[in-house]
């Protein structure tokens, strides 16, 4: 079974802190994604990557950056956390560029105070 | 632009059929997906349909696709309390590097 693991289930950070959310997948997938989920808004794509060191902006990249130094790991970075970044963050991976059966991690609920 | 729309809530009685509807805008999507999210968990792929199909059946699940109207539906037969969850439809526009566009999610509540 594909496993996508996010490093934390719950995080509480202070405004202005630099925050790292880590995601690791164990199935050699090409694509990796970071979404945030907010009630009534569904999932919104922050960034995605289709190869090592490659990244593409999604719909809401402002305030975020990403890093993909190894194929299995995709990190989301909040450069200076703000309260409006309090949300559920979901990482996903998928094996093909045009057929995207994405597999999701369990999510990280981030609270910025 | 790309957009996927769903109604936010659906309530049914145990044993009834549930129908969750979705509209999408990008006709280039090769596949359309239904994901399920149980409380406190990530999303799990439930089923998908290839864009040249009208219908796909998988046990209690039936997916209907109307390409002309860009309308996708998920029917769950004999709905059980364990089906209570949030259901997301998603499209994957062609030539966008595998990007998935999700709807807002429909929260299905199944009452005994």
Image (cartoon, grey):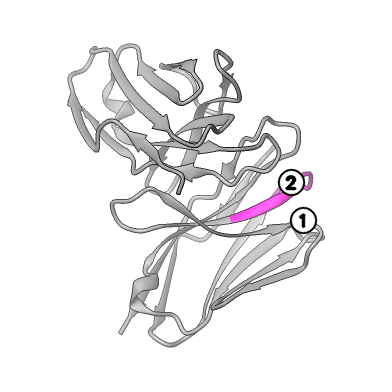
Q: Earlier in the sequence, mark 2 or mark 1?
A: 2
Residue highlighted by disc 1: B51
Occupied quadrant, residue A24: top left
Number of numbered discs overlaid on the protein picture: 2
Question: Which x, y percent locates residue B93?
Answer: 71, 40
Q: Are marks 2 and 1 in contact (CB under 8 Å)?
A: yes
Residue A48 seen anywhere in this rendered image of the structure: yes
**Residue furthest out toward the bottom:** B15
| Residue bearing mark 2 | B29
Labels 2, 1: one chain: yes
Residue A26 numbered tag = none
Please provide the residue range marked out in magenta.
Answer: B24-33
Crowding at label 1, few (<14), some or many (≥20) Cα neighbours within 10 Å? some
State whether residue A19 is above or below residue A35.
above
Give the vertical position of B91 relative to A9 (above or below).
below
Give the image location of residue B43, x and y in percent. 43, 50
């Amino acid at each position: 079974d594909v496993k996508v693991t996010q490093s934390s289930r719950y995080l509480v950070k202070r405004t202005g802190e630099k925050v790292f959310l880590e995601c690791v997948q164990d199935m050699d997938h090409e694509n990796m994604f970071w979404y945030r989920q907010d009630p009534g808004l569904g999932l919104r794509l922050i960034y995605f990557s289709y190869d090592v060191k490659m990244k593409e902006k999604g719909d809401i990249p402002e305030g975020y950056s990403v890093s993909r130094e190894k194929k299995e790991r995709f990190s989301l970075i909040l450069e200076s956390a703000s309260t409006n970044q309090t949300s559920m963050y979901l990482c996903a991976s998928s094996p093909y560029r045009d057929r995207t059966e994405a597999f999701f991690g369990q999510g990280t609920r981030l609270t910025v105070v | 632009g790309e957009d996927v729309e769903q109604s936010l809530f659906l309530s049914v009685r145990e044993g009834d059929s549930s129908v969750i509807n979705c509209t999408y805008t990008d006709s280039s999507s090769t596949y359309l997906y239904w994901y399920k999210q149980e409380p406190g968990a990530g999303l799990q792929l439930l089923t998908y349909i290839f864009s040249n199909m009208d219908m796909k059946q998988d046990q209690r699940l039936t997916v209907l696709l109307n390409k002309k109207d860009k309308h996708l539906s998920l029917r769950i037969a004999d709905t059980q309390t364990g089906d209570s969850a949030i259901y997301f439809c998603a499209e994957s526009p062609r030539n966008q590097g595998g990007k998935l566009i999700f709807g807002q999610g429909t929260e299905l509540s199944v009452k005994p």
